[in-house]
Amino acid sequence: MSRRLWDLSSRLGAQWIMPARPHGETDGEYHPDSLPAVFTRLAIDSREVTPGALFFALPGERTDGHRFVGAAFERGASAAVVQQEPDGPMPGPCLLVEDTRRALWEAGRMVREDLDRVRLVGITGSCGKTSTKEFVAAALGFLGKTTATQGNANNDLGLPITLARFDGDERFGVVEMGMNAFGEIDALGFVVRPEVGIVTSIFPAHLEGVGSLDGVRRAKGELAAHVRKTWIVPDTEPGLAELGRSRGLRVLTFGAGEGADFRVVSLAQAPDHSVLRFACPGGEHEARIPVPGAHQALNALAALAAVHALGESLEPAILGLEEARLPGARSRLLRISGITVFDDCYNASPGSLSAVFAWIGQVHTGALHLVLGDMLELGETSPALHREAGVQAAALGPESVFYVGAHAAAFAAGLSNPDHFFACQTPEEAADGLLPRLAHGDWVLVKASHGVGLSRFVERLHELTSCACT
């Protein structure tokens, strides 16, 4: 693959600043011809630099990447991209640019140009992007070498880093794309240009940036302009399907409706998995989904539709999908001192919360306790959506509800029995309050947007139960 440092500087019209040679050598400075030939990876965190990586010093609100240029070279960086000359002795070759963020984007575009032989799947949606990405990657991984977005590095900073992880000899690639405002999916899609595009779902999310549910559709639909062959969307979104057809794309739908191309025939749910039987253009198949919930079954169905769109066999892909593992605190079923904890606190939106409520209402076997928090970035609709979430929570008949966040009052307004509702200032306070109420065999659902920090609730619960047992 062509990842030449010299090519990057030419594209940016930028100058190299070279370190002085050691004392006693004839020339005062290195010449750019002495640069390492290529970069291996892209990095914006000096702690993640590996030998040969190109480090980008990004200015930020909390810290400035220019402070860590030296640390990047200590970890083996081939060069650094900077907006200002480093103070003191030059630790290594630095490319001086006007905007390191734009330079990172250009480096990602340069890498993408060398991936034409890799068949890419691009994924966006309100909920389920990361789960679907992991399902697609696991399914395609059984069919050939596959590289995918790690974690949720799905924005304009994460995308170039993801592309630079490709070696170029992959058969498949899976790229997740997120957004907070109009134009962001358009920009990401312009670079990725996937063969297959997936919209996982449309729910109220990021409303601060796009204003309404129709705004969400428009923002996610921006991907269609950059998909090269097949457009995969929920069967509940006819407008998105028509958008794909208007672009001349093959359209595949997935869902529970009779007209879906990939259709749920039956779904048997268990606490830690589900068994999906589905119909598709190739007949009926059965797949074991390694995480629970009807919403996750739909994510898996979208993933298998992508395999079909690429012309690959579903049977081995289903075996691969069954081995998928979700990163972070997503759909984790934990057993803590006789208590079943469903930890899904990495993210939350009205759609994902409704899906988890529906699942846990079917499978929990003991008294149910809810530990919930704010769903962020919902704009002016936040109070109404949190009140509706309270109505849905009440339908589960929970033994207790502990809530962390600014929308506690709106959520409580939707509950039919506020006597068992407790508003908490911190996740730790929620854990301290819940523990005395727990009995062997109880279930606890933990869900909120990542920014609420409910992962600390799970950590605290582990600590408290360990202390109780000693």
Image: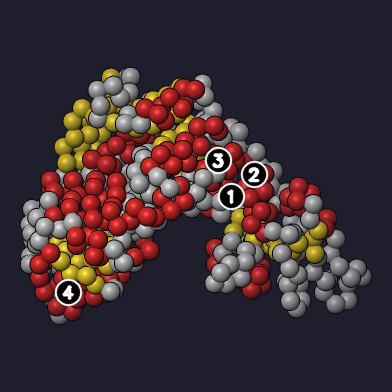
For the residues labelled 1 and 2, say whether their Cβ atoms are less than 8 Å apart: yes
Of badges 2 and 3, nearer the viewer stands 3
Callout 4 secondary element = helix
Q: Which residue occupies the foreground of this view, 319 or 163?
A: 163
Residue drawn at point x = 9 percent, y = 55 percent: 397
Given the image, on which type of amino acid does mark 3 rest? Answer: Asp
Q: Label 1 to label 4, Cα distance in Å? A: 44 Å
For the residues labelled 4 and 3, say whether their Cβ atoms are less than 8 Å apart: no
Dot 2 or dot 3: first in sequence order is: 2
For the residues labelled 2 and 3, say whether their Cβ atoms are less than 8 Å apart: no
Which numbered disc covers residue 186? 3
Dot 4 or dot 3: first in sequence order is: 3
Callout 1 secondary element = helix
Q: Give x and y (percent) for residue 90.
A: 76, 72
Residue drawn at point x = 26 percent, y = 51 percent: 353
Quarter of the image holding residue 461? Answer: bottom left
Quarter of the image holding residue 412? Answer: bottom left
Given the image, on which type of amino acid does mark 4 rest? Answer: Gly
> Which residue reaches farthest right?
26
**Along the horizontal axis of the image, is 126 left or right of 256?**
right
Q: Which residue occupies the foreground of this view, 284 or 442?
A: 442
**Along the horizontal axis of the image, is 460 left or right of 198?**
left
Question: Where 146 falls versus 432 (above or below)?
Answer: above
Q: Label 4 to label 3, Cα distance in Å? A: 46 Å
Dot 2 or dot 4: first in sequence order is: 2
Q: Give x and y (percent) for residue 265.
A: 20, 27
Question: Where 364 falls versus 295 (above or below)?
Answer: below
Residue at the disc numbered 4: 433
Q: Give x and y (percent) for residue 283.
A: 28, 19
Residue drawn at point x = 34 percent, y = 65 percent: 452
Count residues near mark 3 (Cα–Cα under 10 Å), then give few for <14, some for 14-19, many for 20+: many
